[in-house]
Image (cartoon, rainbow, N blue to C red):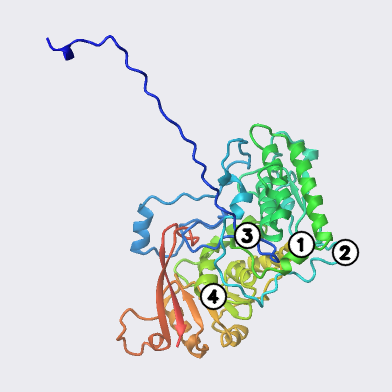
Amino acid sequence: MGIFSHKSKVKPAPQQIRVEKVVVPNKPRPSLTPNGPRASSSQYSASPRPSPNPRLSRPKSASPYPSSSDEKRALARKRKAVTSTPRDSPAFGNDSESEDEDSDPFRKRFRRSESRSVDLNRKLRHKKAFGDEIRDSRIIHAADIASVATKCPPIHGTKPDEVAIELQYPSRCKRERYELVWQKDKIDAIKDILAVVEHVAETYLTYDEAKPFIDHNGSFRRQMERAISEKYRDLPVFRTALQNYNDKLLKLVENGTIAKNISEIHHLPPSLVSFILTQVYDRTVAPKVEMLTKYEMGSDNVYGELLHPFITKLLVEQTKMTSDQVFIDLGSGVGNVVIQAALEIGCRSYGCEIMENACNLAEAQEKEFRSRCLLWGVAHGRVHLERGDFRTSAKILEKLKEADVILVNNKAFTSTLNDALINMFLDLKKGCKIISLKSFVHENKTAINDVANSIFDVQRFRYHENWVSWAAAEGDYYISTKK
């Protein structure tokens, strides 16, 4: 028997694993602009994403708008999840101490990049927001919509006589009234307040000034998050942190810091634009949204909305609008796009709508929009809303000659109305861009008397999922440039 057939009596030494520590240098943070209020206020991206604040009160997708075969195929696919928290529960969270830095808004803020061009003629500081006297902005307060008086139950652990709180904004205006109540599809006070704190820090403050507001360790926002977490549920601590935030921000307003910082920037980040517009919508349109479902099937008078990310893509990236230009929305509904153009671009913005209910809600939105811009301390472009048929409105027909960008959501328009629009566009100035959801140029390029084909250069694009109110699918849109 060979020696290899015997079992050895010698035990082999146990294996050892050698561990070496390697130091990986941290990526340097972007340097702050010496005279700028922020390292980077926000991220502008054209990538597909849902609106930061999807509106739950919008009309359902059972819209009269026709679905293309592409839309139907897209609906059959698995849809992307919406990242925002739906209003089925209060904004309570957990309080994990092991959260990584990606959950820290202070760190995330300074990893962002800015890609839009700067409109140096745009002045963001509101002339009336930073005077010596405290102004009444005449807003619709959150507590007017969601309160004990409107049958909303207090948040767990809050007594009815302890629900009232107030929130300071970056201006010399009176604070907004909230109540610590919660009910599905109503304004979520805690979620709203935490968002305001973060937007104030990201847009109105420098790196060092923002630390007490949103730094991951011990900031006002962090204290509030911890106080309302499932682990603690300590609402008195939440109220104390909120009061400290209010006092600190008011000092920065009174000593001129906020006014100075906002004077040095020329546009708002899209996330703040969307948030302000959603605040306006939730206080004016959402409580009466059922009014928008009353329309005649098969007519031109139907309702659908293009959502905030879509409009940002159109006005900021594709048409590159500036504050000295003119925007017109033909069939402006409740005025969403008109006020977004006025806020995001700072341009003169016109809209015309024929449906009475939509007109009434648009006027309510315009009033709240003006008040809320004052509350936020930001100046907006002029807003003009017209009632009636845009084919016969003297004001609209006059302003069309000055227009730089025109939006017409003609998805459900009849062929007669689309042909009438082409005749209206004959006198547009060269270079004017028309955004539409149906092309005005015939598919057959050799069609006789194709007026649109002779006056427009047309480009076709695809909008992303969740960018329109009537469908979650993708779809086509067109930008026609006047020759």
Amino acid found under the numbered disc labelled 3: Ser
The residue at 54%/67% (across/down) is 115
How packed is label 2: few (under 14 Cα within 10 Å), some, or many (20 or more)? few
Mark 3, residue position? 31
Instruction: Tell me where residue 478 appears, x and y as whole percent.
Output: 43, 74
Query: Which callout, 3 or 1, points at the residue further toward the start of the chain?
Result: 3
- From what the image shows, is residue 255 above or below residue 146? below
Of circles 3 and 4, the one toward us is 3
Residue indicated by mark 2: 133
Q: Please name the residue that numbered disc 4 is placed on.
A: 320
Q: Measured from the top left, where is residue 416 in percent x and y?
A: 43, 80
Q: Disc 3 or disc 1, which is closer to the eye? A: 3
Looking at the image, residue 377 sits to the left or right of residue 134; the answer is left
Mark 1 vs mark 2: give the one in front. Answer: 1
Position of 37 relative to 190 (above/below): below
Q: Position of residue 475 (x, y in %)?
A: 41, 65
2 vs 3, front mark: 3
The residue identified by callout 1 is: 258
Query: Closer to the N terminus: mark 4 or mark 1?
Result: 1
Mark pair 3, 1: CA separation? 21 Å
How far apart are the two marked residues, 3 and 4, measured between alpha carbons? 27 Å
Residue 59 percent coordinates (x, y): 53, 58
Q: Nearer the viewer, mark 4 or mark 2?
A: 4
Classify mark 4: helix, strand or loop.
loop
**Between disc 3 and disc 4, whose residue precedes?**
3
Q: CA distance from mark 2 to mark 3?
A: 37 Å
Front-most of 239 and 122? 122
Tell me which amino acid carries mark 4: Lys
Whether residue 10 can be seen here:
yes
- Marks 1 and 2, how far apart at CA: 16 Å
- Alpha carbons under labels 4 and 1: distance apart: 28 Å
Q: Within 10 Å of the Cα at label 4, are there few (<14), some (14-19), or many (20+) other Cα atoms?
A: some
